[in-house]
Amino acid sequence: MSGELFLAIDVGTGSVRAALIDVTGKILELASREHDQIVPEFGWAEQRPLDWWEGARASVKTVLDRVDGARENISAICVCGQMHGLVLLDAHGALTRETAPLWNDKRTIDHVRHFEQANEPDSYLPESGNTPTPAWPGFKLQWVRDNDPAAYARSAVAIMPKDYINYRLTGEIAMDTGDASCSFLMNPLRLDWSPVMIERMGLDAAKLPPIRNPLDVVGHVTEQAALDTGLRFGTPVLVGGADYPVALLGSGACRPGMGSDSTGTGAIITVIAEKPLLDPEISNVATVEGNWAQFVLLETGGDGMRWARRAFHGNALSYDEIVARAAEAPAGCDALLFMPFLTGERLGPHRNARAQFFGLGAAHGMEHLHRSILEGIAFAMTRHIRIMEHASNKPLERVIAAGGGARTELWLKIKASAFNIPILVPREPECGIVGCAAMAATATGRFSRVEQAAERFVSYGAEILPDPTWAETYRRTQPVFDQLYYHSQALYDDIDALAAATRPTQP
């Protein structure tokens, strides 16, 4: 080994991973430590920050042991992490609550509903940059204030998962613009905490940390952290970033006009722009390079295939076999549409949206049902792309695919044809790790701009082009999908009432 190294730490929902990357962006070693998700009540999701630190400590030690001389050759450490998890520390840095509610925790739904009833979108979108959702840490702080007032009173600062790892490494506290922008408490124009939002939500501004640039050095590895991890005392640690914008950077989606399709359990469609899009249907996150990622998260992405595998086949078929069946149906599925809302929607007044097949006829078979699920998710993503393109008056140039969905060629071709935009797939799937490396390389002076580092570190496989025939079919189908989307909303409350009325009474 020769030359400098970068250390990346990724605090995910399922595990903490550490990786050593060389100055060309190549991942040399990667280790991980899994941790559990705690579900004390329906709709809740928590994890222990101490488990994150133990995972970081163990995985860092592992990769250092695998590479001779790594400890002395690390020029910078960059941490990224899952977003929205609320970590509360007292004035001495001790946790005031053993667990942190996660991004998928829904316990704040009543606080969100109360806020929506009391406030019009025009009054909060310019101050927060986002639409209310249970995910945002601002609502989690409200919940702690109202349900655990003792912990709220003892808390000196509220931070995110990667910030806690930074604190354990350096003893310093800060939050990057990405995590802060999705707190529901940051003004998107000033990139600072919004006194308007803090007052409106009845929170204590003194509990919010400084907001800093992701490429700034937050501090240096302390003697204790060096003993815990095997790292060299004094190694610089960056502020780092939220995992989503860091992964966008590590996939190469870092310039206005570029898009990203990240399909895992859910599906996130993103458009990179110079400013946020203040629309009730769109979320916004500040990116590492200083742009904004306008995005929509569909709760049902790959989960649609998982549901079909269980519901139609009792999990007896593999996903490859299901995709092969879907490939037997024609584009457009002979006018069969699927609305992909198996677990509702994340934003807006219709979070209780339902999934449905529409247009079923006697000639349709299982192959149509499977393909319509893939197409329905693509149509839902296309609808949001058109909203973002219309608002920015700038067409999306290309989309970069990531997540498990990037491995399904048929689905990529369906999406490319529905979007009518080429799709690229990065050769290195560890986009978050690559993004951290690009940040560290820029912060240490190897590149003048983080976009240059991404261009050097990221390469792509084959480009997936739209099929002209499929694209024309989807162009005609999209308006019908959009109409069905809107007309179905009138029935969701009725369906909820019907379900409640027919639910068996508990003895």
Image (cartoon, rainbow, N blue to C red):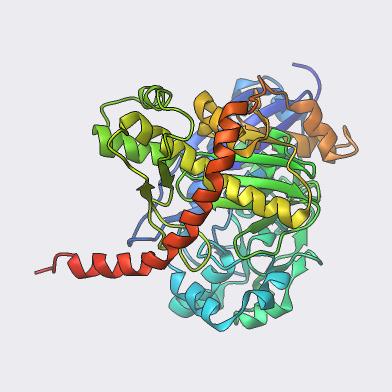
Q: Position of residue 60 (x, y in %)?
A: 60, 34
Furthest residue in direction left, as rendered? 507
Q: Is residue 454 left or right of residue 37?
A: right
Q: Is residue 183 left or right of residue 143?
A: right
Q: Image quadrant of residue 12?
A: top right
- Tell me how many marks there are: 0
Q: Is residue 101 above or below residue 194?
A: above
Q: Position of residue 46 (x, y in %)?
A: 43, 56
Q: Position of residue 415 (x, y in %)?
A: 57, 35
Q: Is residue 155 left or right of residue 324?
A: right
Q: Is residue 373 above or below residue 197?
A: above
**Residue drawn at (66%, 54%), measured in percent from left and top?**
387
- State the residue in front, 467 or 167: 467
Q: Is residue 496 left or right of residue 302?
A: left
Q: Does the rendering let one see residue 277?
A: yes
**Residue drawn at (39%, 54%), measured in percent from left and top?**
343
**Residue drawn at (61%, 31%), measured in percent from left and top?**
430
Q: Does the rendering let one see residue 12?
A: no
Q: Image quadrant of residue 392?
A: bottom right
**Residue drawn at (72%, 72%), measured in percent from left and top?**
127
Q: Is residue 341 above or below residue 419?
A: below
Q: Position of residue 362 (x, y in %)?
A: 27, 37
Quadrant (top left, top right, bottom left, bottom right) of the C terminus: bottom left
Quadrant (top left, top right, bottom left, bottom right) of the N terminus: top right
Furthest residue in direction top, as rendered? 1
- State the residue in front, 172 or 359: 359
